[in-house]
Image (cartoon, rainbow, N blue to C red):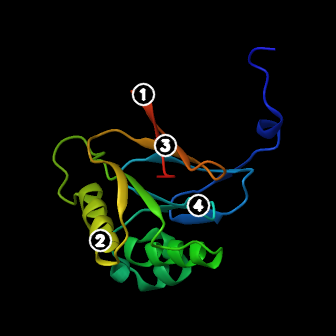
Amino acid sequence: MAGAPTIAALFTQRIIIGVGDVAVSNNQQVVLSTYALGSCIGVIAYDPFTKVGGILHLMLPDSSISPDKAAQQPAMFANTGLPLLFRAMIGLKADRHRMNVLVAGGAGMLSGSDPFKIGERNTDVTLLLLKKNGIRVSHQEVGGTINRTLHLEISSGCVSLKTPVGSSQFNLVS
């Protein structure tokens, strides 16, 4: 029957990652999703050998502006959230040298001039920290003025990136 869901689709579990949060999984029935990345950054990391994936939805570049908040919610900041993401994935037997990474978001969401340039700063700090730690970025969809939504299928490493103007598919296996 055309359009009928597959058995696997019936048992798929979607985990939603909110602003300033992180999630990792090695369960092949899981899809990780994060919505409405404006100036925030979404970092997806995936190890195709172990099929371990994770998403970080960070909000700000540097935790030094609020050490107390960083202690309570480290995923809110690039400099504390990225280590959290990679430690959690390594805890599930991922290897950072096999990981493929996609970075999305960092848009300028304020109309007119944005004196804070949060999206741009989030992007710059995130990419710099990944580079400094030898983490290769396979794909990046950053900047502009549109929001982005990300979905990662743990079973396949397939990423769906949706915007108000369309969608793209990326495979983080190769």
Q: Which residue is mark 1?
A: 166
> N-terminal of the two: label 4 or label 3?
4
Q: Nearer the viewer, mark 2 or mark 3?
A: 2
Which residue is painted at 79% across and 40% down in the image?
8
> N-terminal of the two: label 2 or label 1?
2
Marks 2 and 1, how far apart in space? 29 Å
Dot 2 amino acid type: Lys
Q: Which residue is mark 3?
A: 149
Q: Which residue is mark 4?
A: 53
Q: Which residue is mark 2?
A: 131
Dot 1 amino acid type: Gly
Marks 4 and 3, how far apart in space? 16 Å
Quarter of image, res 25: bottom right
Position of residue 45 measured from the top left corner of the image (x, y, whole percent): 49, 61
Rate crowding at label 2 as few (under 14), some (14 to 19) or many (20 or more) other CA atoms within 10 Å: few
> N-terminal of the two: label 1 or label 4?
4
Tell me the element at label 2: helix
> N-terminal of the two: label 2 or label 4?
4
Q: Nearer the viewer, mark 2 or mark 1?
A: 2
Position of residue 112 measured from the top left corner of the image (x, y, whole percent): 18, 42
Q: Nearer the viewer, mark 4 or mark 3?
A: 4
Q: Is residue 95 above or below residue 10?
A: below
Q: Is residue 77 above or below residue 18?
A: below
